[in-house]
Image: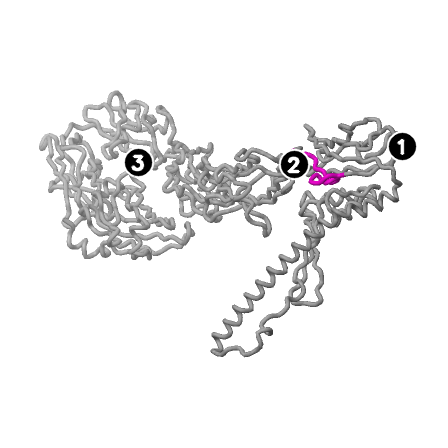
Amino acid sequence: MVPAGWRSGLVSIGRVVGVFLLLGVLHKASAVIRYEILEEREKGFAVGNVVADLGLDLGSLSARRLRVVPRASRKFFEVNWETGEMFVNDRLDREELCGTLPSCTVTLELIVERPLELFRAEVVIQDINDNNPSFPAREMKLEISEAVAPGTRFPLESAHDPDVGSNSLQTYELSRNEYFALRVQTREDNTKYAELVLERALDWEREPSVQLVLTALDGGTPARSASLPIRITVLDANDNAPAFNQSLYRARVPEDAPPGTRVVQVRATDLDEGPNGEIIYSFGSHNRPGVQDLFALDLVTGMLTIKGQLDFEDTKLHEIYIQAKDKGANPEGAHCKVLVEVVDVNDNAPEITVTSVYSPVPEDAPLGTVIALLSVTDLDAGENGLVTCEVPPGLPFSLTSSLQNYFTLKTSAALDRETMPEYNLSITARDAGAPSLSALTTVRVQVLDINDNPPQSSQSYYDVYVEENNLPGVPILNLSVWDPDAPQNAHLSFFLLEQGAETGLVGRYFTINRDSGVVSSLVPLDYEDRREFKLTAHISDGGTPILTTNISVNIFVTDCNDNAPQILCPWPGGSSVVMLPRGSAVGHIVTRVVGWDADAGHNAWLSYSLLGAPNQSLFAVGLHTGQVSTARPVQDTDSPRQTLTVLITDNGEPSLSTTATLTVSITEESPEAQAEFSSGSDPREQNKNLTFYLLLALILVSVGFAVTVVGVIIFKVYKWKQSRALYRGPVSSLYRTPGPSVHADAVRGGLMPPHLYHQVYLTTDSRRSDPLMKKPSTSSPLASCQNTLRSCDPVFYRQVLGAESAPPGQVGTN
């Protein structure tokens, strides 16, 4: 039970007596708070409200995971997340924690997350008088010669009280007697010891022994005590007692001194001779427990040596009491004191404790992001205990000291997961001793991927050449695209888009595998239909936000020889008869065979040859021009009607060919008459054609008239229903002669294909109309027919144009 006086004199238990110290730790300044509490408090006793003292939000305490990190292995304190109170979690024994140290402080670290913050708390454990003084022995025996003069001092056994301050050992009391008095002395460390002072000479013959009781008292309220019986045996006289040459000896010894190291040699002399002058050295009774385990004393020489292992961190100064006695029948003793100062050496390496690690770290984390908290301890003192921490150079991390013996690991440069996805940081703690000691620990930091890289490709565009008539579904392009981000962010999706205003190419001609990026054609491509496709490959990754990349894909269709030559002249649909005057000379141009090929390049190069004729020696065909000419003069013996077959072959592989058949009629007329005959034609044939066209025109006019009448009647009925009145005009006024034709179509000849026709359109209800000419598209492969015709000689070109108005089967000769 704690005394009432103590309770009234102490500061209120659990009250904060420290102040907030601004220390730039982590995201904001942290504080050191201090509490005072009596030892032996029951479990659950409230020390103080750390949440209120630190200015934290009680509502977010659970989410921020406030926890207490002790420096010792036992958790003496915990924090209640509901109230913010720090309470006692384990038995607090000040003597067990701090021994005889005058001040006992338990240092704690309070850590909260989101954001990560570190605070320090110190709890001062105040002593209570819960320990009695105690003597090392149950009884003390002394032998004192009767010849000892009054005033002689005799050291007594010292009592030990583990309490400190006013609760520690304060004084000694001696039972009443007529020979001795008690003198209480104070050591350099403020501890008390007692000496027995002889005030009246002893008389062995009168009283051979004396019984005393020594009582040790502490300063508690009430005081605690311990008693030691003292039995004094009175001896017969020994004239001279030993004497030391000095009462105090000093020595300095390093803590790593090996056993057997000499510390100091004490010297005492005795004026007696013989056994009464021989001195024996021994340890005195005032020594603390454990002194004889660390030091050895030579009984004869008085040499004090090292026996055990000294430890500066345990005890810095040893106070040793040595006594000297002679070998007489009634030996008398002398006493001296030896102060041994232990010199610290750098024998303790630093210890690193990783308190908290924030991993993985996003690669876009700002500079100064806290990665870990490290605490470093070194048991040495002075420069031997000064510790610095460092990370290997060249890494995007740095260490800063936040509190004493605490270091914060932060980012010092931008992180890039694609360059380094993980770091194993070797953190070295090194003290300032000589030689320096160090400790090494490894902190593993993983870098969390952020979608900061769009899909990448080795090419910004692709030019693909596909031969026409390809198989549908066969891949024509595999896009090489990758994303350096992590697998989730690097998942790619492929899409095909049209370029410009043109639509329908993707769904009609091409498709792309959404996962692999393989482009395939849906239909066979035709060079003659379309030679080039411009598409855009749109690639998106799987991150958030989505990053995309566009790649131009140009698909060029290459030509293959899949079109046989076609004949423009003579027209394949009609009969072609060419007049040749008998007697024509060698080289006379009879006609020209004109062909064209829908293919391109060398596949469209045409060559002409004479495949069949009744007389092979009469005609020759130009290899590249297709001109049919006489190879020799026309003779009277030649047949008047010659049928020629001309083979037209392209230059493809394999080559394709077609044949043109024409009839050559050998006449007796001159070329001028022949031209007149050709333009006159057969009168019966012309009458037949004229009758057909007149009949067709009559039918068309009748149909048009009937349609007009029906339309006018419908219109009048509609107007009559609206006005509810009959229209009273003459019946003849209801009809009107159809006006001029509102549409005129060009006369189509039988030589050229339909897409080469010229069409003329006139606007409706207009007496004056501008003709609108609709020309064939130049992108069509058949447009090369006009170029082919124009490449012929001018006479032949005029003949072909004139054939549009001539009936089929009549072709003029050159």
Residue 9 visible at all: yes
Q: Residue at x 71, y 45 (%)?
A: 750
- Residue visible at 25% across and 44% down? 76
Residue position marked by numbered label 2 in the rendering? 558
Q: Do the residues labelled 2 and 3 touch (CB within 8 Å)?
A: no
In depth, the one of 638 and 492 nearer the eye is: 638
- Which residue is labeled 3 in the image? 319
**Can residue 412 be seen in this snapshot?**
no
Q: Give the labeled residue for mark 1.
A: 586
Image spot of residue 738 (x, y percent)? 64, 66
Query: Mark 2 and mark 3: span between their CA atoms?
Result: 107 Å
Circle 1 Cα neighbour tier, 10 Å, few/some/many (<14 / 14–19 / ≥20) = some
The span picked out in magenta is: 562-576
The residue type indicated by label 1 comes to Val
* Labels 2 and 1: the sequence-earlier one: 2
Rendered location of residue 688, percent (x, y)? 71, 49
Residue furthest out toward the front: 684
Disc on res. 83: none
Q: Main secondary structure of the magenta part?
A: loop
Task: Specify the farthest residue to the top.
Answer: 274
640 sits to left or right of 74: right
**In the rendered image of this protein, does residue 704 appear above or below residue 777?**
below
Give the foreground label among 2 and 1. Answer: 1
Q: What element carries label 1?
A: loop
Quarter where residue 647 is shown: top right
Q: Which amino acid does label 2 sit on?
A: Thr
| Residue closest to the far left | 206
Location of residue 174 by image quarter: top left
The answer to which of 24 and 309 lies nearer the viewer is 24
Of residue 467 and residue 35, the one placed in the foreground of this image is 467
